[in-house]
Image: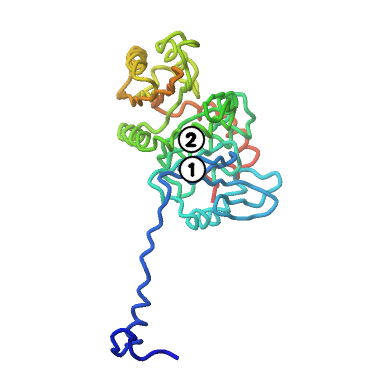
Amino acid sequence: MWDLNCSACKQPIDYEELAVELLNLPKVEPRFEAAEVLFVGVERTEIPGAFTSNLSVGPESSQELNGLTLRRVEGGTWGDYLGEAEALSIWLNSVSFGRSRYALVVLDTTSPLSVLAARSPVLRGAPVIAVTANDDSTPMDKSCSYASLSVLATAGCPTLLVTRSYAEALTLYTPREGILRGYGALSHIAGRYTARAEAYSNLFERDKRLGIFVHALSILPTASDRVYRDPAHAVDAAAQIRSVTHSEEEVHSLHLIARAHTRHLRRIEKAYEALRRRFPNLLDSDTTLIESDNGKGLYDIAILYGLRGDPLSPLFRDGYEAVAAKNPQLRLEAAP
């Protein structure tokens, strides 16, 4: 039995008016991570402070918050998965990809899913770490890489090129995780991007204003004077091992990101200034210096090279044409 009068003030209770007030639901303000990472053809890795998910193939199609699995096509090539574009878009929208301020795609361009992902309008504009075929890869891998890189270039995605051989040979040491190798190390690099997403985003946007969309990488984590004698030698060592081969003339921008104790930062910066003089066509250069004291004298050096164009696609063109001659459906012009 409802009380018709308030037990405290004895005034009549207007239940009809109160019922209307129940319709005013509290405003929902979801809090999303500042960054999100989609792995395509690469195993998903948890990254602190970021939402991570992956696109893969399996025996059956399924979708979860952290991943979309498409049914495997036996003997499938990149052309066989283009028909899944709607399924990919629906899933990306369902998990609100693009909800975070910063997004990153880690894409194995030799995966048959790579062209599908590269063509997705939901992902368009997101920076991409693109693992590519090597010069000595099979024509099928070169075909897939060529097609993916062509789509990324058309979409205007900032793309960091990493050859498969470079990715597989990566070895990093972190005090927390120990030694990381191969794609585990590459995922750690993705984590470093999300940790400094604002700085990297600003870097890529500034390069885009100069028509620079393709980058290469040199990274030397946890270096020390015990190994490299001094920061000058460390910077020089980092510059010798790049994620793709390119000439000095192709470099149009150069960016240093260094984390070190204050006493090392100035020496690293000075060595970087000397390195800069090697590039005759440089349009822009800057530094991001992060003070950090780990108590062990370790420092991290990363150098990003903004390139005039994609130095890899011309190497993959013959493989692409050889495959397309056998299967005309594996031409971008024939893609639905």
Left or right of 284 on screen, residue 92: right
Rendered location of residue 126, percent (x, y): 42, 42
Amino acid beneath label 1: Val
Amino acid beneath label 2: Ala
Rendered location of residue 207, percent (x, y): 33, 32
Considering only order in the chain, which callout, 2 or 1, is on the residue closer to the N terminus? 1
| Residue linked to disc 2 | 190
Taking the spot 42% from the left edge, 15% from the top edge, the residue there is: 235
Mark 2, Cα crowd under 10 Å, few <14 / some 14-19 / many 20+, is: many
| Residue linked to disc 1 | 37
- The quadrant the N terminus occupies is bottom left
Query: What is the quadrant of residue 200 in the picture?
Result: top left
- Does residue 277 appear anywhere in the picture? no
Taking the spot 43% from the left edge, 10% from the top edge, the residue there is: 233
Q: Is mark 1 on a helix, strand or loop?
A: strand
Rendered location of residue 276, percent (x, y): 34, 16
The figure's colour scheme reads rainbow
Q: Is residue 114 above or below residue 319?
A: below
Query: What is the quadrant of residue 7 in the picture?
Result: bottom left
Left or right of 290 on screen, residue 192: right
